[in-house]
Amino acid sequence: MHPILEAQAILPRRAFLSRGALGIGATALASLLPGRASAEAMPGLPHFAPKAKRVIYLLMNGGPSQLDLFDYKPKLVEQYDKDLPASIRMGQRLTTMTSGQARFPVAPSKYKFTQHGPAGMWISELLPHTAKIAGELAFVRSLHTEAINHDPAVTYLCSGNQVPGKPSLGAWLSYGLGTMNKDLPDFVVMTPSWTGRKEAQAIYNRLWGSGFLPSKHQGVALRSQGDPVLFLSNPDGVDGATRRTMLDALAELNRKHFDAVADPETQTRIAQYEMAFRMQSSVPELVDLSKEDKATLDLYGPDVTKPGTFAASCLLARRLVERDVRFVQLLHRGWDQHGNIAGDLPNQCKDVDQACYALITDLKRRGLLKDTLVVWTGEFGRTVYSQGGLSKTNYGRDHHPRCWTMWMAGGGIKPGVVHGETDDFSYNIVKDPVHLHELNATILHCLGIDHRKFSLKFQGLDQRLTGVEECKAVKALLA
């Protein structure tokens, strides 16, 4: 045989590894070509009857201050400007931003708190709209993580691992549970504007990436300006019929390539082209708010008609889950208040407060909240001691991974409860700690997934969203 023909006949090493080590993605094309049924779930999933079908994940990027929003500590007033006791800090590590401070003066919250809901949840005056839905929420005051800086912490939150490159939660769900809407992606991401601290932490598209899963499962980012999705519009001179003819020819070439090398990413590429073609009609309809009634727009507040705001993104999130998109994630930046809490934190809260209230209210009145899980959290909390200058009217707070407060609502979650407790300084957990892996295990449980059985072999390991250490879903939060 001619050497060139002989080389072509041999299965390439890369194709062999793709086929043998990955063994995934074989159903991607069948799920998305025109006229086919929607994608099937991973065999054996769900493990049990789910309470939730979809997730809206509201990520407050930067680390909201639990001390100024949810974790009321009235005894701190007596500790104003006193040094944080060594018995409380217990030698825990600090960031380089405060490790050089001569003192760690205690900074009580300057904001007033009142109780709401059946559990008497303490909520800051900065969140008056959120307070009105306290009865629908489950608060966790004892979430904790090992990561102390933003990038590893938010990567950990999104993918279950501090090291970049692992699949995000939305990608895992897309891979495991399949799609419910063949005209829209399983996983959609929005990055709303913010009005707090302008120097916000950077975010990266790997936070909604697919890692070692087929790239079909990565999040699709919706933009607030221009085409909602890049390259969605046809180029000048190309109409729909021409694009269809081109895609059919391209798909045939890609199928022949797949027959030759068996690379699952070839099928993913075909599926993505087909999805983009269908999104040319589904996405413009999705982002057209003209059919929303005035009462709904008023519910979300005056920012709802401004593209790219958190309010507009929340309304789009409702429209997405209404169309059975599996996972919608909003990343709202600007919560990293190392200083000027009095100036920046109220603006951040104003961005999200009414919109969160509207989202929960809107989902409930449409019958969607019962099977849609809503999650609100940052990647860590803030310190009780002040970073930089301290006065009774203004202060800053450093990163604090040892405890913070988040809330959940909707499908599978018990409403109106408070779980976990911190000490008088909101520095250490004294009751019912919840690790980040346990939060993810709880989210998976609501979707009918036993996290211990949800794994994929990669690089010789059974990879899981929830890591290898023992953890469980938090039963106290489950309805």
Image (tube, rainbow, N blue to C red):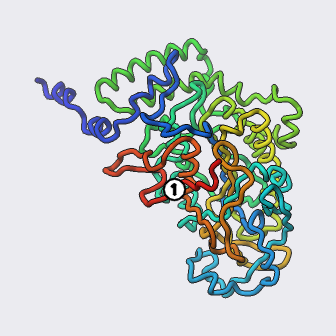
Looking at the picture, how far across and down is residue 465, in whole percent?
48, 50
Identify which residue is drawn at 25% across, 39% down: 13
Left or right of residue 422, residue 355 in this image = right
Q: In the image, residue 168 lies at what x, y percent?
A: 52, 47
The foreground one among 394 and 360 is 360
Residue located at (57% from left, 51% from top): 442
**Vertical relation: 54 (above or below) 278:** below
Q: In which quarter of the image is residue 257?
A: top left
Q: What element carries label 1?
A: loop
Q: Where is residue 132 in the image (x, y as percent from the top left)?
A: 84, 51
Residue denoted by label 1: 472
| Residue drawn at (48%, 46%) of the image | 450
Q: Is residue 339 visible?
A: yes
Q: How many marks?
A: 1
Residue 351 is at least partly visible in this image:
no
Which quadrant holds residue 18? top left
Considering depth in this image, is 254 or 145 the residue closer to the camera?
A: 145
* Image x and y of residue 90, in percent: 58, 83
Image quadrant in which the N terminus is located: top left
Residue 270 position by quadrant: top left
Please identify the residue farthest to the left as the structure is shown. 1
Residue 137 vertical placement versus 363 (above, below) = below
In the rendered structure, the answer to whether residue 372 lies left or right of residue 6 reads right
Q: Which amino acid does label 1 sit on?
A: Lys
Q: Residues within 10 Å of mark 1 (few under 14, many from 20)?
A: some
- Position of 465 compared to 197: left or right? left
